[in-house]
Amino acid sequence: MKGLAVISLLSILFSPRSLATSAAGPASDSSRPHHGWAKIGPGAPGVWATAAVDPRATGTLYVASVGGGVRKSIDNGSTWSTVNSGLPTAIYALAMDASSADTIYAGGFLAGGGATGVAMFKTTDGGTTWTALPGVAGQIVVTLTADPHIAGRVFLGGFGGAIFRTVDGGNTWLRVFGGTSAVTSIVIDAYDSNIVYASTLSGLLRSTDGGTTWTLLSTLSARPLWGVAMDPADDAVLYVAAGNAGVWRSLDAGLHWQATGALSTVAFALAIRPSQPQTIFVGTSSGVWKSADAAGSWESTALSGQMTFSLATGPGDVLYAGTASGIRVSADFGATWTDPDPLEGGAQAFGYAITADPSVPGRLFASTLGSTARISTDGGASWSDAGTTFDAREPRKINVDPTDSNRVYAGSFVSGLFKSVDGGATWSRRNFGSGNAYVWVPVVDPVSPNIVYAGTSGEGLFKSEDYGETWSQVPGMPPLVQGITIDSRDDSEIFAATSIGILHSKDGGQTWTNVLSRPAWSMTIVGGDSQIVYATTKTAGVFRSLDGGTHWDSVNVGITNLLMGRAAPVIVDPEGSDVLYVGSEGGGGVFRSTDGGNTWLPVNLGLSDTLVFGLAADPARPGVLYVSGPHGIFVTTTGGK
């Protein structure tokens, strides 16, 4: 048996909660740090990899999570230990080598920081120690699959679309495929290791020569696929999880496909009962579903209401499901489930971005990797899920309408854009573009709030003129738009942060000029002087313009890592435009300037992790800042000092 390696950027939906559309004020300062930073949540971690289960029935299994690293059990989950010596805590994928249950491969991307960070690790002593593997630096490892028959042979699928293969236990890696769409799962034929399938967000790939060359199976080429599974009794029978399109089946090794029984939810992961291949399980946005007739019909199992993005089977037909609150286990084919490791290593959810409501003091939204969106109405003292109908897998940036706090918009890694009209209590989805657009950021026009922009990954920029109900694509934009900033005095002035640089429009988005040819994350227009604009770039630090974006200068003196946080724009202190804050994703933490960006100093007292993905300020209280990153959300009331 081989643990099914599936992309598993997990979210969880708990029981319905009542979320107030207005909030009490933030928690009192007595509960906050007088100096530096303190952690404030936002809750349980996401499980990013299925359990790596020993097929030899030794009782050994491993689980990976973001923020918690790797957990291990040697007694079928009765007891657990954390095995992170030499390993980063942000691990996305696991695979067990065919040679031994003590040889495990683990993949992530945060170790060492940024684009040059180590991506792959290996242990040969059951997790007691881990060694960094060469050859795949800079990769975001989404999925790992070890050949169940050939020791040392492992495939790696990357977020950027690459597939790597090693045949010597990870000492060397060969890039065998270079696509542009994330590789979500890889399956090796149980009878012939030369036959390998890989699901991607643009279709299914097949190799018949051990992964050296690949063919895109054209009948599924236009569909985003989240998982692929092979019938253990008949390698010509394949299943794919196709998101909103449900589950599809092929009876001829992927040449032709048919949709299976109707599934009223979003399909992300697959597993097949080894002793009874007619029994199929699918992990969905509403839990785990089961079919007893080869996907002809579906019924919900007892694990419902929890987004499930990873599934695996173990000896004795035991089924493992990865959720944002930990691994769930069923020994009776989904009738009942247990939570074997409730602590999950004490990890926090990975905070991707943090948003402070500009009108309601103390109300915060946190988007997470591996969980759904979270909301706090007391300045981060407590958190809950941001609405039970927000089934977005991996929410991205969240923005609140500055004229009406009941209107909230949230981007999603795969599910498009979500909108709430009751302050985050309930949400509805808005589709545009491909229908599965990766929405980086939604932004509300501060002058005309009926106008909303959405920057996407791969499909450019979209615009709505009716509060996000209908959308049209903005022509002439590059495919990747990651930040949008609109001048609050004149909404004809718009900046867009893209993969080719900062684009500037002076006519409300009709025409654009590239004013800074550096791949960028964000722009900030200084409130009292619209001629002063700051930009954060992906790898070149902070830039400043003093003439409204026409000319730019690098302002990085004192910033020790120029890989800036993707949701960490330059923050301007409301009490003085020369006091600025910015965050580094590469490990530098938070930096403060008191001279308009000419020089910077780190302000990281109390930050347990200086990988800063998101940075936000309380609009009503100077010095109150929030940071999001791999170890959760942090707050300071003293400007980080």
Image (cartoon, helix red, strand yellow):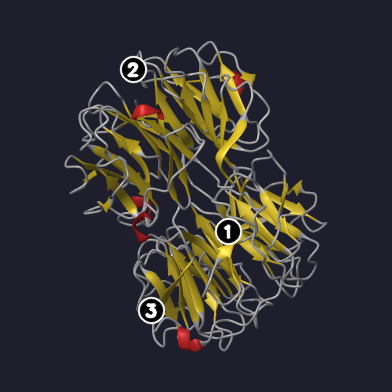
Tell whether label 3 touches label 1 (CB within 8 Å): no
Q: Earlier in the sequence, mark 3 or mark 2?
A: 2
> Residue 72 placed where, x, y %?
28, 46
> Residue 28 placed where, x, y %?
53, 86
Name the residue: 33% across, 17% down.
193
Residue 256, by quadrant, is top right
Gap between marks 1 and 3 measured at Cα: 27 Å
Q: Residues within 10 Å of mark 1 (few under 14, many from 20)?
A: many
Between 478 and 381, the one lying in front of the other is 381
Residue 584, by quadrant, is bottom left
* Residue at mark 3: 603
Disc 3 marks a residue whose amino acid type is Val
Task: Mark 2 vs mark 1: give the one in front.
Answer: 1
Tell me the SS state at disc 2: loop
Q: Give the answer, above or below, for where 288 lies relative to 372.
A: above
Q: Earlier in the sequence, mark 1 or mark 3?
A: 1
Task: Mark 1 vs mark 3: give the one in front.
Answer: 1
* Residue at mark 2: 193
Between 613 and 12, the one lying in front of the other is 12
Name the residue: 75% across, 53% down.
463
Q: Answer with left or right where residue 612 lies relative to residue 392.
A: left
Q: Answer with left or right where residue 430 lies relative to residue 71.
A: right
Q: Residues within 10 Å of mark 2 (few under 14, many from 20)?
A: some
Gap between marks 3 and 2 measured at Cα: 52 Å
Disc 2 marks a residue whose amino acid type is Ser
Taking the view exactly as shown, the residue that stands out farthest to the right is: 466
Between 90 and 167, the one lying in front of the other is 90
Gap between marks 2 and 1 measured at Cα: 40 Å
* Residue at mark 1: 373
Q: Is residue 484 visible?
A: no
